[in-house]
Amino acid sequence: MSISSTTRIINKALATWKWFLSWRTSEWSLNDYPIRVRKQEPDPTFSAPRFSHHIYLAYIINGAMAGSGNTPVEAMADLRQNFESARKKRKEEVRPAIRPGLNWPVEFASQEKVSTDERLSEEFIQKVLGLDWAWISDESSLWDFHTEPTNELLLAKIREVYGVDVSDVESARLWEIFERINQAKE
């Protein structure tokens, strides 16, 4: 869905206004950010049983954060929860909040854990996920690579390729699966 030029102008004006207002304080809440709520049209070609379609999307203009719900209030509540979670994480990492109205930088998750065995990582991507390549991080999980209701097909593939049962790895994070595969090799 493309954004109309009128919507772009409104978004830019709102972001600029919130930026000017942000200079009144250095502690910002969600209400200090430029937020829009819009109704989404479902994509009839997308079918994934484990994903539910939410009708409304609430998002921070110029920010990499959104929330969704079946009503505007639900979408805003989801956005608020995501915002508070990210805010807490930034404080733990001793990083300043991003000023309202500014473009948020793209931040990639760490690859420290998933890169400890690059050979296994590349082999797993090709043999289990069936991809030539993929960018994976410490936050990547099996759920990121399919739309099925369960991970059973990939868990079976891991058993077939590596002879290891990882069905009890609740997070399904790849780095935890890699650790289990390496432990089995020892």
Image (cartoon, helix red, strand yellow):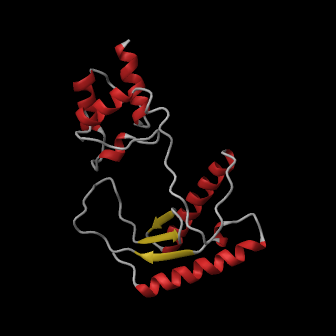
Residue drawn at 44 percent across, 72 percent down: 56
Residue drawn at 35 percent across, 60 percent down: 52
> Is 123 in front, or is 32?
123
The location of residue 147, given as percent across then percent down, is: 28, 50
19 sits left or right of 55 in the view: right
The location of residue 145, given as percent across then percent down, is: 31, 45
Total label count?
A: 0
Residue 168 seen anywhere in this rendered image of the structure: no
Question: Where, by quadrant of the figure, is residue 92 drawn?
Answer: top right
Q: Which quadrant holds the C terminus?
A: top left
> Is 167 in front, or is 163?
163
The location of residue 29, given as percent across then percent down, is: 68, 66
Q: Which quadrant holds the N terminus?
A: bottom left
The location of residue 67, given as percent across then percent down, is: 49, 64
Identify whether 27 is placed above or below 93: below
Residue drawn at 45 percent across, 70 percent down: 57
Q: Residue furthest top?
A: 186
Q: Residue furthest bottom?
A: 6
Identify whether 181 is placed above or below 128: above
Question: Where, by quadrant of the figure, is residue 170 drawn?
Answer: top left
1 sits left or right of 11 in the view: left
Identify whether 10 is placed above or below 144: below
Residue drawn at 44 percent across, 37 percent down: 171
Question: Where, by quadrant of the figure, is residue 22 drawn?
Answer: bottom right
Residue 3 seen anywhere in this rendered image of the structure: yes
